[in-house]
Amino acid sequence: MEQRKSVAAEHNDSFELYDLKVEAVAPPGVKVYSGAQPGDYFELKGEMLYLPPGQGFSIYSLSAVLPLLAAKQRETAPLDWMTSDEEIANPDPHCPVRLKITRTGKRTFKRADTTAVALPPATLTGVPRATLAPGYEISRLIKGGWHLSGDHGAIDRDQALRDMATFVEAGITTFDCADIYTGVEEMIGDFRAAYPALAKSVRVHTKFVPDLAALDRVDPALVEASIDRSLRRLKQDSLDLVQFHWWNFDVPGYVDAALQLKRLQQAGKIQHIGVTNFDVPRLKELLDAGVQVLSHQVQYSVLDHRPEHGMDAFCQANDIAFLCYGTVAGGFLSERWLGKPEPTETFANRSLVKYKLIIEDFGGWDLYQALLRALAKVGAKHGCDIATIASATVLTRHNVAAAIVGATSAAHLEAHRKVGTVVLDADDLATIHAVTARRTGPLGDVYGLERDIEGRHGRIMKYDLHK
């Protein structure tokens, strides 16, 4: 049979559905895994449920890696009947069970005419899930949006939308963005319009970040106008999570702004409120004022342990989950830098400048290289790269709900997915800790160094980003 392209990759409004009878050639109750021959129309991926022999299923997939879905279907094209009865080998070499797949029909449906309900994604895709509040579940890997803002090189917008679909199909169903990430909220809104069936399973975490120069002018009208703008850009009736950032705590008004977010939450424009880059005293002020904070987005990595300087204990005591960025330090935690001399040239983007400063605070280039060697050793044991082990290590930390992976494309998607499946044991963590225990920094509370506008961390920041 000729090779077929993934339906999701064709950016159109229809997909093919097969009526399948899936029969496990094994005793009832045996857990089985399934796959299809290369080039076939349809592939079943991931862990199947317990399949009693002979039970029939009508299921569809927008790509080879999408979790199995149940759908409300409306036929839009004539039936194209075909039959095939074959027994396929199990792709899991440790499980000899085989599956018998009978295809009885093919139909074409419009995505807009389907109502999809995902079966448990953690089981089917390997990407773990975290529940932040009753009824509010996210993937423990979050697709970051900062790198799509144009400050990191040219972005192919159409390809970026297709990549978003690919991430969702792989089980990474939570996106991070901000009102200051130029064009990113609009891009996610366009994705939601182009892929309505996939969008139903997506959580979008945006941020409310008033410009530094405007902090003294933040009032209820400005807050509401900012939230309304995000709603329009994202094409949502209510924002899933708004993460609040305030550049300078010496400028009053952050508590009042957070209380206005709470009023908008009560009005239904916001589902949940989070913060990003707050320190312990100011976060406590918000809680004392009656703002219910669901999450705190912080920079946290094997290079940067500042959340452990009191913030982790405070958030754990107040049921505030960490959503962590910088887990691969802008790419510095990767094989690309292993064994390399300290760079002296100008970096291509601000992200590398930012994390090179963190390396210097950590203890310098030699200690950083020792950390890369430790991560590589653990990675070799698990068949993973350095970046995967670095992010997986952060996911083992107290109170960490998710790691944000910055990606301008889906090129490293399979490596990202491994972050959720690798299991680090005590020996692995001890190998990494033997190096990180020798660190000299960074010191202080979350984001304290970056908040010093005159300091070397603060001088590289951009504080007035609204356009």
Image: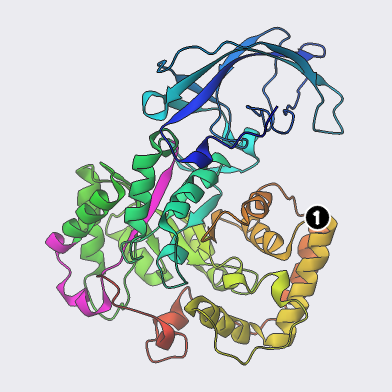
Residue 443: quarter of image? bottom right
Q: Position of residue 143 (x, y in %)?
A: 50, 54
Which color mode does the image show? rainbow
In this orientation, does residue 85 appear? Answer: yes
Q: Is residue 227 magenta?
A: no
Q: Which residues are magenta?
A: 201-222
78 or 18, nearer to the observer = 78
The residue positioned 22% from the left and 80% from the top of the image is 213
Residue that sits furthest to the left in the current view: 221
Is the residue marked by circle 1 packed among few (<14), some (14-19), or many (20+) residues within 10 Å?
Answer: some
The residue positioned 73% from the left and 33% from the top of the image is 38
Residue that sits furthest to the top in the current view: 54
Q: Is residue 138 left or right of residue 374?
A: left
Q: Position of residue 374 (x, y in %)?
A: 79, 70
346 or 453, nearer to the observer = 346
In this orientation, does residue 242 appear? Answer: no
Q: Is residue 219 magenta?
A: yes
Q: Amino acid at mark 1?
A: Gly
Q: Position of residue 413 (x, y in %)?
A: 61, 52
Residue that sits furthest to the front in the current view: 2
45 or 49, nearer to the observer = 45
Disc 1 secondary structure class:
loop
Q: Which quadrant holds the C terminus?
A: bottom left
Q: Position of residue 395 (x, y in %)?
A: 62, 56
